[in-house]
């Protein structure tokens, strides 16, 4: 069982959050899984962690379509944060709009974190999704 | 012989003013007047008894035997002769008359000699004039005719005969002369004219058709004049001219002129000719119709008289350029604005007119009215724009649909996968609950999408004139509990009688959404104030609704505020659908919606109702 300090799930869909949490349970041991309904809330939490010296999450599951602040807007601000470690970000979306995939690729190339792309539905989370390698799964 | 020697007679003869000479039967001179001697340049004393032939020898122009014949024949004879004195040729005519005594005995001959220089000159002049006249008549094909009324004799000159194609020996009479004219108009007309000339002396000049002796039809110009004596017509004369080629050429010219005029007038183009000061010299029917004026009202006018100043100046500059460069301006799109302000699009060509020295003295202009085509072009462009926008909207909508449906089906798929693998009964039940929740969400989504599709497909929407205030009050009543609960101050300044063109259900939806939004996104610790206002503009009514709520960062969300499933505040009720739907409804009615907002101050939505009934 892989051990991870902290995981963020940023998605306004409760069912997806439930699913991700459930799937994580089978492959990872983590006591700090936090879920946020939009990018803004996640960013606020991240900033607080940086300020208070609490380590940032190692893995983030990020939805694209969310109110207030969507996944892309979150990434826009996220890349400006002062983070010491590379973070694995799994972009998870039900969108099959090619422009979303293009955007993911643009971000992947310009940010130094690990960016994966996963289309819903997802049935399991692989250990590789939690390792620091760039992969994408397309339907 | 002796008798004539009587001196008084001799002296008398000597003094005769007319040059006269008396000769005996042997042709010897007996006596002569001094004037006679001077004609032959002789001295009287030395000439007596000289043979007359000898004396005549100093003159020329006749043969010696001619003289002898005249003397021998004993009857009156004439002889022309010439002499040269002072290097000038003099013409003489000698008249030979037999000379008898009282008893009719032949004594000799009396010769009288006249200087006929004047007559000869006159004759030469007459001959010259005749020749000239003949030449003239041949060249101009002008013949003449004369009618002597007393003798009922008509005379044609040779040219007149030639024109009639009759032989030179032909002797016409009045009836025959008139019958040469072609039966019908020509013959009736000439008969009438001839009659009037004969009776009243009314002159005429007319172009008519004759049928020649050989049977050819020819146009002639016949003229007639009367000579009167004591107020009575005694003689008629006139001219007769072959004008066949001329008339045919005239007819041809007229025909081609007619053809050209018909062509220019009926071209579906405005045609005009201008002089170098841009004054109109010619306008065709289309140009007259376009300007609503008669040709005589347009000739001499410039564009400054007909169009507004700016347009006229552009046109004048074009004219000058065409005349300066001598290069045609072809198919240029121009806009003319008439004095009444109406504009017309033209496709205009201007071609310089050059004189024989190659200088431009004006131009020909042709303008085709393409206003209609322009309008069609604009309509087409608009249609393309509308189509492009709608296409974009459709693609956007398709993505939304696909995304939303996918997200639910993805959830189903995932949850079902869990369910199959799950062993724990309580966990199974939890998953079942979630499945049922996902199913509800899917139904909601479908319902929302249906609502949107309804707007987009509602082509036969029924816009009606609706009282805005009545509709606001209706919404206010429906929401009364909601408004009261939230302590909303509702300031309605919409005029009572203001109407908008709208689909009834849409108007209610617009007001309802905007009012509830204003309440939903209020400042947490402030009572909401909603102000409604409306005013009529040219083609639209602006309906404004302002609040003192949270406001929205338009720099950040401006392009998304009317998007589907876009929410910007932490509000549990937000579906991200209201503004998307009313924007679609407003646009479907040909209107628009705009937003002004400032964070923590409030938001104003302006709805533009399109008042043009489409």
Image: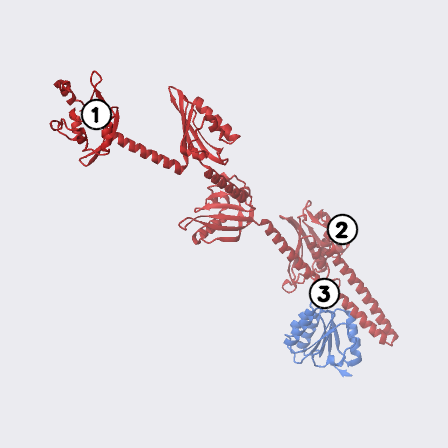
Chain colours: A blue, B red
- Residue assigned mark 2: B477
Numbered disc 1: secondary structure: strand
Q: Nearer the viewer, mark 3 or mark 1?
A: 1
Residue B49, above or below A76 = above
Residue occupied by mark 3: B399
Q: CA distance from mark 3 to mark 2?
A: 38 Å
Q: Image check: B105 left or right of B142?
A: left
Q: Residue furthest left?
A: B45
Q: Position of residue A135 (x, y in %)?
A: 71, 78
Q: Nearer the viewer, residue B483 or A12?
A: A12
Dot 2 and dot 1 residues touching (CB under 8 Å):
no
For mark 1, name the chain: B
Image spot of residue B137 (x, y percent): 39, 35
Pick whichever of labels 3 and 2 is earlier in the sequence.
3
> Which mark is in front, 3 or 2?
3
- Give the chain letter at badge 3: B
> Between residues A92 and B425, which one lies in front from this camera angle?
A92
SS for tag 2? helix
Q: Which mark is residue B111?
A: 1
Task: Label 3, secondary structure: give it.
Answer: helix
Sort mark 3 into few (<14), some (14-19) or many (20+) by Cα contacts within 10 Å: some
Residue under the image location 51 percent in, 53 percent down? B330
């Amino acid at each position: 069982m892989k051990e991870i300090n902290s995981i963020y799930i940023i998605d306004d869909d409760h069912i997806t959050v439930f699913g991700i949490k459930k799937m994580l349970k089978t492959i990872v041991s983590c006591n700090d899984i936090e879920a946020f309904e939009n990018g803004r809330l996640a960013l606020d939490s991240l900033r607080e962690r940086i300020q208070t010296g609490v380590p940032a999450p190692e893995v983030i599951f990020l939805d694209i379509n969310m109110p207030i602040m969507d996944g892309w807007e979150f990434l826009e601000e996220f890349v400006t944060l002062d983070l010491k470690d590379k973070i694995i970000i799994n972009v998870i979306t039900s969108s099959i709009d090619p422009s979303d995939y293009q955007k993911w690729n643009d971000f992947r190339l310009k940010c130094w974190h690990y960016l994966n792309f996963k289309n819903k539905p997802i049935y399991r989370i692989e250990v590789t999704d939690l390792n620091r390698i760039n992969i994408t799964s397309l339907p | 012989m002796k008798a004539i020697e009587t001196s008084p007679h001799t002296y008398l003869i000597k003094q005769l003013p007319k040059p006269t000479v008396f000769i005996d039967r042997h042709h010897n001179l007996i006596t002569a007047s001094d004037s006679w001697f001077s004609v032959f340049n002789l001295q009287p004393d030395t000439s007596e008894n000289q043979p007359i032939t000898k004396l005549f020898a100093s003159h020329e122009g006749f043969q010696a035997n001619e003289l002898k014949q005249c003397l021998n024949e004993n009857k009156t004879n004439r002889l022309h002769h010439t002499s040269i004195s002072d290097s000038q040729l003099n013409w003489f005519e000698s008249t030979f008359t037999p000379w008898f005594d009282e008893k009719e005995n032949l004594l000799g001959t009396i010769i009288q000699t006249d200087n006929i220089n004047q007559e000869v000159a006159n004759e030469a002049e007459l001959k010259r004039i005749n020749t000239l006249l003949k030449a003239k008549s041949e060249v101009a094909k002008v013949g003449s005719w004369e009618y002597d009324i007393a003798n009922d004799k008509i005379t044609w000159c040779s040219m007149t005969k030639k024109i009639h194609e009759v032989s030179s020996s032909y002797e016409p009479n009045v009836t025959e002369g008139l019958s040469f004219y072609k039966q019908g108009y020509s013959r009736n007309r000439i008969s009438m004219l001839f009659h009037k000339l004969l009776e009243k002396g009314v002159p005429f000049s007319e172009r008519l058709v004759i049928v020649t002796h050989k049977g050819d039809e020819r146009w002639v110009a016949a003229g007639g004049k009367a000579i009167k004596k004591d107020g009575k017509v005694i003689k008629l004369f006139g001219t007769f001219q072959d004008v066949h080629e001329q008339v045919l050429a005239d007819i041809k010219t007229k025909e081609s002129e007619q053809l050209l005029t018909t062509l220019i007038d009926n071209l579906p183009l405005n045609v005009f000719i201008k002089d170098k000061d841009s004054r109109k010299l010619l306008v065709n029917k289309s140009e007259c119709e376009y300007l609503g004026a008669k040709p005589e009202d347009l000739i001499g006018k410039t564009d400054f008289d007909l169009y507004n100043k700016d347009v006229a100046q552009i046109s004048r500059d074009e004219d000058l350029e065409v005349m300066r460069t001598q290069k045609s301006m072809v198919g240029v799109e121009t806009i003319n604005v008439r004095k009444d302000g109406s504009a017309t699009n033209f496709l205009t060509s201007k071609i310089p007119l050059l004189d024989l020295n190659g200088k431009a003295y004006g131009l020909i202009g042709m303008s085709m009215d393409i206003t209609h085509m322009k309008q069609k072009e604009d309509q087409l462009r608009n249609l393309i724009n509308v189509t492009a926008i709608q296409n974009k909207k459709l693609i956007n909508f398709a993505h939304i649909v696909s995304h939303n449906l996918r997200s639910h089906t993805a959830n189903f798929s995932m949850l079902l996968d869990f369910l199959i693998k799950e062993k724990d009964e309580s966990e199974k039940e939890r998953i079942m609950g979630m499945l049922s929740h996902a199913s509800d969400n899917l139904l909601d989504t479908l319902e929302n999408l249906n609502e949107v599709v309804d707007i987009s497909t509602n082509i036969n929407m029924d816009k009606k004139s609706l009282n805005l205030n009545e509709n606001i009050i209706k919404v206010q009543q429906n929401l009364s509990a909601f408004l009261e609960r939230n302590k909303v101050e509702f300031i309605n300044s919409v005029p009572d009688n203001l109407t908008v063109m709208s689909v009834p259900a849409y108007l209610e939806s617009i007001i309802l959404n905007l009012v509830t939004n204003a309440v939903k996104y209020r400042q947490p610790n402030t009572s909401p104030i909603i102000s409604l206002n409306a005013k009529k503009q040219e083609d639209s009514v602006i309906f404004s609704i302002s609040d003192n709520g949270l406001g929205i960062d338009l720099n950040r969300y401006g392009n998304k505020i009317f998007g589907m499933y876009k929410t910007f505040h932490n509000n549990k009720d937000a579906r991200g659908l209201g503004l998307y739907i009313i924007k679609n409804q407003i646009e479907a009615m040909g209107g628009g919606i705009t937003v002004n907002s400032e964070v923590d101050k409030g938001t104003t939505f302006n709805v533009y109702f399109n008042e043009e009934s489409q």
